[in-house]
């Protein structure tokens, strides 16, 4: 079972269908936990961003027996030292990951963009969870495990695994 948890204010309508699609991608049940506040200690006042590694730490205790993975969903700008921003971060050892909608939103904000936002959210969710199942970055730019530097990368690859990564995933994850 994979658990999803909202961190801070996240508009649930932006995530419509996400759990169903994750269930299909990972062949596992997905449950929703009660939302958590964004941790104060993760906020960097100089950068006006949240340190994703500090958010991940707050997810560790949620990984109780029976919960294979915990995926946090935020709507704030995330970073790690050395990078301007990150779409998300995973801790494979602890089985937790987080991603943010903040940089996934299309600029024009029309209703047809909602589908695009949902596809991007699914892509980032599948990618970060993939790391928690031991997958590294894939050189195939059409594979969800390709490293995204930009939304162009995210949109090109989409939420699907290449055959090699899919094979590895279910070999490792069962
Ligand atoms: Zn990655
Ligand atoms: Zn791949």
Image (spheres, rainbow, N blue to C red):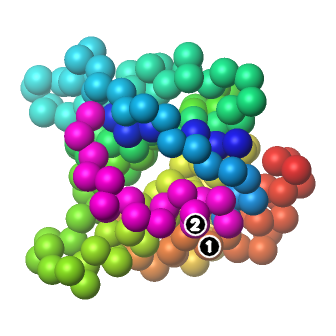
- Looking at the rendering, in which quadrant would you find the N terminus? top right
Identify which residue, 10 or 41, lies in the foreground: 10
Res. 86 in view: no
Q: What residue does disc 2 label?
A: 21
Res. 162 in view: yes
Q: Secondary structure at mark 2?
A: helix
Marks 1 and 2, the one that precedes in the sequence: 2
Q: Does the magenta-highlighted stretch encompass residue 15?
A: yes
Q: Which mark is residue 160?
A: 1
Residue 34, position as x, y percentages in the image: 42, 32
Q: Is residue 153 above or below residue 98?
A: below
The main secondary structure of the magenta stretch is helix
Residue sitting at x 47%, y 20%? 57
Quarter location, residue 52: top left
Give the residues drawn in magenta, as a range.
8-24
Quarter location, residue 50: top left
Quarter location, residue 15: bottom left
Calculate the distance from the C-alpha at mark 1 to the C-alpha at mark 2.
11 Å
């Amino acid at each position: 079972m994979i658990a999803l948890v909202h961190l801070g204010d996240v508009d649930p309508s932006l995530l419509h269908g996400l759990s169903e699609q994750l269930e299909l991608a990972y062949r596992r049940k997905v449950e929703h936990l009660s939302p958590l506040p964004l941790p104060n200690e993760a906020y960097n006042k100089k950068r006006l961003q949240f340190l994703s590694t500090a958010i991940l730490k707050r997810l560790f205790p949620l990984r109780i027996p029976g919960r294979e993975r915990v995926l946090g969903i935020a709507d704030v700008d995330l970073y790690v030292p050395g990078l301007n921003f990150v779409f998300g971060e995973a801790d494979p050892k602890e089985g937790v990951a987080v991603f943010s909608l903040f940089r996934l939103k299309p600029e024009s904000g029309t209703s047809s963009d909602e589908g695009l936002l949902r596809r991007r959210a699914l892509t980032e969710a599948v990618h970060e969870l993939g790391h928690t199942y031991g997958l590294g970055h894939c050189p195939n730019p059409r594979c969800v495990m390709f490293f995204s530097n930009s939304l162009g990368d995210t949109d090109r690859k989409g939420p699907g695994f290449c055959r090699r990564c899919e094979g590895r995933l279910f070999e490792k994850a069962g």
